[in-house]
Amino acid sequence: MSTLYDRFEAAFMPNYGVPPVALARGEGCEVWDVDGNRYLDMIGGIAVSSLGHAHPALVEAVSRQVATIAHTSNLFLHEPEVLLAERLIGLLGGQGRVFLANSGTEANECALKMALKYGRTTGRTYVVAAENAFHGRTLGALSLTGKPSIRDQFGPFPTDVRFVPYGDADALKNAVTDECAAVFLEPTQGEAGVVPPPDGYFRAAREICTASGALLVADEIQSAIGRTGHWFAHQHEGVLPDILTLAKGLGGGMPIGACVGFGPAATIFAKGDHGSTFGGNPVSAAAALAVLGTIENDGLLEHVRTAGAELADGIAAIDHPLLKGVRGRGLWLALVLTSGRSPQVQAAAQRAGFLVNALQPDAVRLAPPLIITSEQVTAFVTALPAILDEASRD
Ligand SMILES: *Cc1c(COP(=O)(O)O)cnc(C)c1O
């Protein structure tokens, strides 16, 4: 009898390898594999499962919507998408216009097309992004992704993208001339290892873009929807981008992406410039409304700050030769290791009943559901020294 893992390997393209756990179901912050083993989910489907698994509000919203009308296409409009766009605008100070997509990379494709159209009409010929940035895997978003190992074999790309070191405001200033159409930045770099920039960097980026007339695009696909303890990470520095992209946590597990334009950027597209058959799908829109409503009604932003501080402080208090420290904000953290043993940490955590993500050789990502309890945080922190011991051995 071949296992599910063998069958996965035989049936799928090799782009993911074979993942180490086959999950069967989840409830709250816990998931069970196909053999019945239980894990505390400390990665939340890569910062996606904001309400954990099988949350009643999400189940109710999705079930009701799928039983009412599951799809309209963009030939027809529907109330859930209007409510969602209005809700996002409301969270962003009452301004902006929204495009709904199905994923993060598509939200960035939308932003890039807006930047290219803006550039075309203003004589701006290139775009700036950061080294080690991750903006997605489709060709437009991939051209902005500053990681040679995932981009180089698919180039050259049609867009002139110039890369600057992340966090260096002077380098950014030098790179952004009046021929630059847009600057794409993550407020904290996610895939690079949950790497926050120095304080004030995002504000400096805002000033540089305003001075030169380039659009500032905040890729908040991983950082938004409460992940850092605010609705959006750019709010930590009190600045608004010209374009904002969202996805991961927005749908609580249902696929959805959003691109929001502010000021003149809100109306760069004219009728016919962009579209998506599934984008703004009623079921995903209903899911996103349930996520936003639950975060607000249950006070989850405040909870993320408290639980995130407990988690970060708990980790920081551990004295272990493999552990250098912890970085990040809210419930979006990286355990920073003293050597490249993150795969061993991930494997040892799994054996101990915790799902974490070996993000970089020396960085392990934690992005648990926003509803993680204090007891669950304590359970992880308590188990961590033994996990690190084991990871140091094998
Ligand atoms: C995950 C991610 C993306 C890509 O999102 P997909 O839904 O996988 O296409 C883009 N930008 C950032 C910052 C991300 O974290």
Image (cartoon, rainbow, N blue to C red):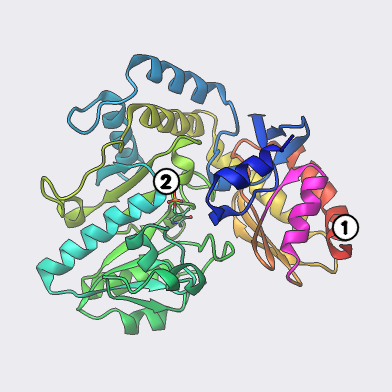
**Residue at x 13%, y 68% (from the top left corner):** 120
* Relative horizontal placement of residue 263, taking residue 291 as reference (left or right): left
Mark 1 or 2: in front is 1
Q: Nearer the viewer, residue 306 or 280?
A: 280
**Residue at x 74%, y 34% (from the top left corner):** 1
Q: Nearer the viewer, residue 58 or 14?
A: 14
Query: Does the beta carbon of the residue at mark 2 sit less than 8 Å from ligand 1?
Result: yes
Q: Which residue is mark 1?
A: 390
Query: What's the amino acid at mark 2?
Result: Ala
Q: Is residue 85 visible?
A: yes
What segment carries the magenta color? Answer: 340-357
Q: Which residue is mark 2?
A: 247
**Residue at x 34%, y 15% (from the top left corner):** 68
**Residue at x 42%, y 16% (from the top left corner):** 64
Mark 2 lies on a secondary structure that is loop
Residue 159 position, x and y percent, is: 27, 71
Query: What's the amino acid at mark 1?
Result: Glu
